[in-house]
Amino acid sequence: MKDVAAQAGVALKTVSRVVNGEPGVGPGTLARVEQAIVELGYRRNESARQLRSGRAGTLAMVVRDIADPFFAAIGRAVEMTAHRDGQVVMIGSTHEDPKREREVALAFCARRPDALILAPIADSQDYLHPEVEAGLPVVAIDRPAHGILADTVLSDNVGGIRAAVDHLVGHGHRVIGYLGDDPVVYTARERVDAFRAALARHGIVPDESLIRLAAPTPEGIARSLGELLGAGPGAAGAVPGAGPGVPGALHGTGHGSAALSGAGLASGEPTGPMSGAGTEAPAGVAPVPAGPVTALLTANNRITAEVLRQLPGMPHRPALIGFDDLELADLITPGLTVIAQDAEGIGRAAMELLDTRLADPRLPAREVRIPTRLIVRGSAE
Amino acid sequence: MKDVAAQAGVALKTVSRVVNGEPGVGPGTLARVEQAIVELGYRRNESARQLRSGRAGTLAMVVRDIADPFFAAIGRAVEMTAHRDGQVVMIGSTHEDPKREREVALAFCARRPDALILAPIADSQDYLHPEVEAGLPVVAIDRPAHGILADTVLSDNVGGIRAAVDHLVGHGHRVIGYLGDDPVVYTARERVDAFRAALARHGIVPDESLIRLAAPTPEGIARSLGELLGAGPGAAGAVPGAGPGVPGALHGTGHGSAALSGAGLASGEPTGPMSGAGTEAPAGVAPVPAGPVTALLTANNRITAEVLRQLPGMPHRPALIGFDDLELADLITPGLTVIAQDAEGIGRAAMELLDTRLADPRLPAREVRIPTRLIVRGSAE
DNA sequence: CTGTTAGCGCGTTCAA
DNA sequence: TTGAACGCGCTAACAG
């Protein structure tokens, strides 16, 4: 910039004015400065500009995996909005590691971004306290943040699950299995609770023996699938106390952390399914769980993919709905019916929350729910 | 930092020493400073540090679409390596728009990153001349850059195509159709040339009427598929001069830009396929193209996906190999055989090129080819 | 319309 | 072992 000023025979500030398109520069001077800029290949240094002006023009985004299609799609939406506003975005992955979340988030914050978009994995984000205190706007996506003031954008898990259950019940299914993630995961809890509540709305008492919650491993899913699909009433009842030596063994229910359950809905103790469209299930004894499920709800894309992989080896193929859309889901046979999250909507909502907070930093924490969409392709008839 | 110094009762420089872990600080002083840092929630400002020291600790990456699984996977590999080295990465998409490539790349460069990784879409990257001149290391991925000095990381397109053709021919296919992208695209040219050369290696004279090169549109692909699969010799020959009003009409050959062809291979003019394992193809007249293809090579993932979508409506289902792996490719029936690119390898190779160039900025431009892998899943038997 | 001065937060140089 | 002064490239706040 100094060189440009010298070359054009003007003062530093004049160059600054030209570079920033500020008014109050004579046409002759302007031309001379612009020419000098081109000749010297001058480019403004944004770092210095930021240091002086405070405005960063940079957004930080920390997700669990930038190669995960869900987060990649959110990232794209964020980046498009940011680009429109002349901002660039730094992006990083936690790879499900709380320690790494901290490292990446703090490395980003050291660059003093205008805002931080974060898909939490750690139990608490209190390590961000100094930055939030200093005015950094944070918006949590997919899961809420804890320990700091942050806006939140979440999918409407309850609505999505309910639509799926409605669809299955509408097609005559009464004995519906559920494969969800480990209940330490916020969305896993929210979804399984929604599942129970959605069943209850149809007068179906949720059968806990048909609900499997665990981190998705091939072995665990194989075991659950086998029990849910192949076995008669006995096998399903034999689940608690999973066999020793089985890694990632599945739990019948949720660590007690699924506490906020379908409160006020379906009070009585489980008395088995109402009747069941199931054909081969012998009329069970009193509180004994039902026989093989006729339908399956898989509560995230990793579980869905693994189930699809294993289904051919199973005694029968149930109706299936997966949470999260999958690429090529329309190409498998039958087409996979899914509860699709609106990644673009989530990204845009996050940017809007940031906009309004930038305008008024003293806003309270807000939570936005983005609708999901049931995409019917045939696998759930 | 000033506040920390005041709180600890030391000079600015001492705080700087503590923050950077420099030696020469008394244990008592160190403790006092560290306490002050925690109490005040002090965080070093990387922007200011960069301004002073020159080192940015930031990498810029510009791809065509960060939500494209291929680039997302490269991005992940880059980010993991960068994280190990204490760097953060800015990422942005061009969305196939040359103007936007320029905008995004220059916006990144204004932040003075340590290096730029770029998947070119524009014809020339000469707009980056000032930054390259100033010492910015650039590495082009997926396609070469033009107009600047840059290292390049490319997939071994030739080897991948050859493996695919070998596989098809090994299974008795002689009449192989090819659907590729518009030959303005570098990889499209390279791949179709490799296709011709690979056929020639088997003594098969490439039949240009079976090679369709165009930007992938559903309509264009439908048309090509219909002609390649359904029609007898006549229809295939009737391709040139595509019907008016058909957007994205397909061209029989490559704009002349596919010039570097299989030089030295297969000289003579096309005289039609040698014989053909094809069953229903009537013995054609002299130089007339063959009947329906028995196998199909789709030269990128967008084309492959669209073909898979349309195949059920076609007269018969050919053997199929796609360039680029697809998520769930193992779940469709039959499993899709693909030429998989090594996205992680590309990302890592890019980082290695940067490492060596940082060590010696005067290196000449280098080009690295990353092997592809043929994943056999059954669709190409 | 144009120029001068100061300082953003830090690292570097040299002196104490 | 510690500290004071200077400047990285730029913009804000004032002069002329």
Image (spheres, coloured by chain):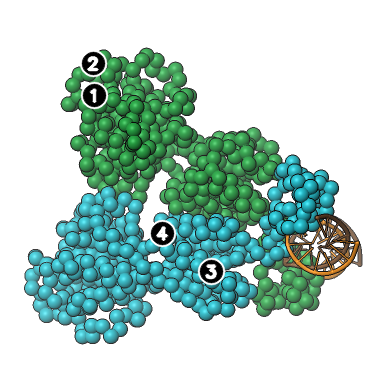
Chain colours: A green, B cyan, C orange, D brown
- Picture coordinates of residue B200 (x, y %)? 22, 78
Q: Nearer the viewer, mark 4 or mark 3?
A: 3
From the viewer's side, name the closer residue of A247 and B260: A247
For label 1, the SS is: helix
Residue picked out by circle 1: A233
Amino acid type assigned to the residue bearing label 3 in the image = Leu
Amino acid type assigned to the residue bearing label 1 in the image = Pro
Asked if one can make out residue B54 in the rendered structure from this viewpoint, the answer is: yes
Amino acid type assigned to the residue bearing label 4 in the image = Phe
Q: Label 2 lies in what chain? A: A
Mark 4 vs mark 3: tell me if same chain: yes
The residue shown at (16%, 81%) is B271
Q: Is residue B16 left or right of residue A341?
A: right
Mark 1 vs mark 3: tell me if same chain: no
The residue shown at (84%, 48%) is B9
- Picture coordinates of residue A184 (x, y %)? 47, 33
Mark 4 and mark 3: Cα distance apart in space? 20 Å
Q: Is residue B211 left or right of residue B232?
A: right
Asked if one can make out residue A156 in the rendered structure from this viewpoint, the answer is: no
Mark 4 and mark 2: Cα distance apart in space? 54 Å
- Crowding around mark 1 (Cα neighbors within 10 Å: few <14, some 14 to 19, many 20+) is many
Label 2 close to label 1 by CB (< 8 Å): yes
Mark 3 vs mark 2: tell me if same chain: no
